[in-house]
Image (cartoon, rainbow, N blue to C red):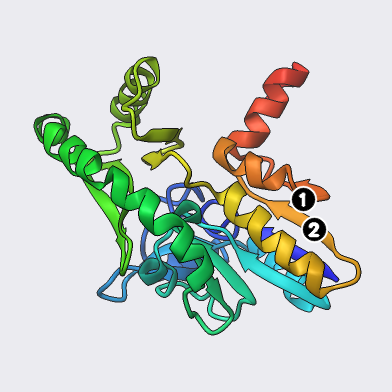
Amino acid sequence: MNVFFTDLDDTLFASLGKHGVDDTSPDAIAENQLHPEAFLKGGDPICYSSSRHRALRGLMERQDGLMIPVTARSVDVLGRTTIADYDFAICSNGAVLLDGGGVVDAQWQGRVTDLLRRYQPAMDAFLVANQDWSLRHDIRHWLVKEPGLGPTYYCAKSNVGRLQDLNRAADTLRESPPDWVGTIHCNGNNLALIPKGISKRDAVEDLLGRLRKRYASITTFGIGDSVTDWPFMSVCDFAITPTGSQLAGLVRQAAGSPE
């Protein structure tokens, strides 16, 4: 049994900017062979797949196996993608586990509920404390929430594409992280603070334990683009990353290879 644990954003689809496309007209999108894959609440597309993205997704879908999204997207935001046919899904950086019907796994939710409840006052206070910073730098920030769990992690994005503001904030936070923070993730226009005890890796390992009891033999593939995807990718038999990803960049740097 082949099991594919795959990140979504910047792995199976990406924003127009990440595709290097500035023209948002239908003609430009068609010329670049891009297909809409993720949408805003109003229905406007926000992320697109390239022909190579679709080739990877098609390869997984053609296998006699399981395709399992492992994403920072909340359950609601996952629902605004074309990834509707999955066997399981891990959302909110590991805070939520869904079955193939989109039903929340009660066992996993029971594990994370008490943990997140413990950190909620500190997460709320952090959001309030950084309000002036977000206004000063034109950054939108919020706590990603899930029904029944409340806040699952903190997220910040620049409204004007000043990625250096997010990077500086991440560096400052790494020097003295808040007590509730387990992981600080900064990749492109995305800064995320993930509570201690919440991770994609923990959710993948829990699900792997169940799958190994169900199937006599499995081969696992971890697919992702960012440094914070590596922990869940590393518990799989094989790891796959886009060559233009944050993770691939670190490999090139370590190998002394040119860009």
Q: Quadrant of the C terminus?
A: top right
The reply to whether discs 2 and 1 touch (Cβ–Cβ < 8 Å) is: yes
Instruction: Please tell me which of labels 2 and 1 falls first in the chain.
Output: 2
Work out how far the residue at label 2 is from the one at label 1, CA to CA, in angstroms: 5 Å
Numbered circle sitting on residue 236:
1
Q: Quadrant of residue 59?
A: bottom right
From this viewpoint, is residue 34 visible? no
Q: Quadrant of residue 215?
A: bottom right
Q: Judge whether 141 appears above or below 5 on screen.
A: above
Amino acid beneath label 2: Thr
Q: Judge whether 136 appears above or below 244 on screen.
A: above
- Few, some or many residues within 10 Å of mark 2 (<14, 14–19, 20+): some
Closer to us: 163 or 180: 180
The residue under the point 40% across, 73% down is 80
Q: Quadrant of residue 185?
A: top left
Closer to us: 254 or 108: 108
Looking at the picture, how far across and down is residue 144, in whole percent? 30, 55
Amino acid beneath label 1: Cys
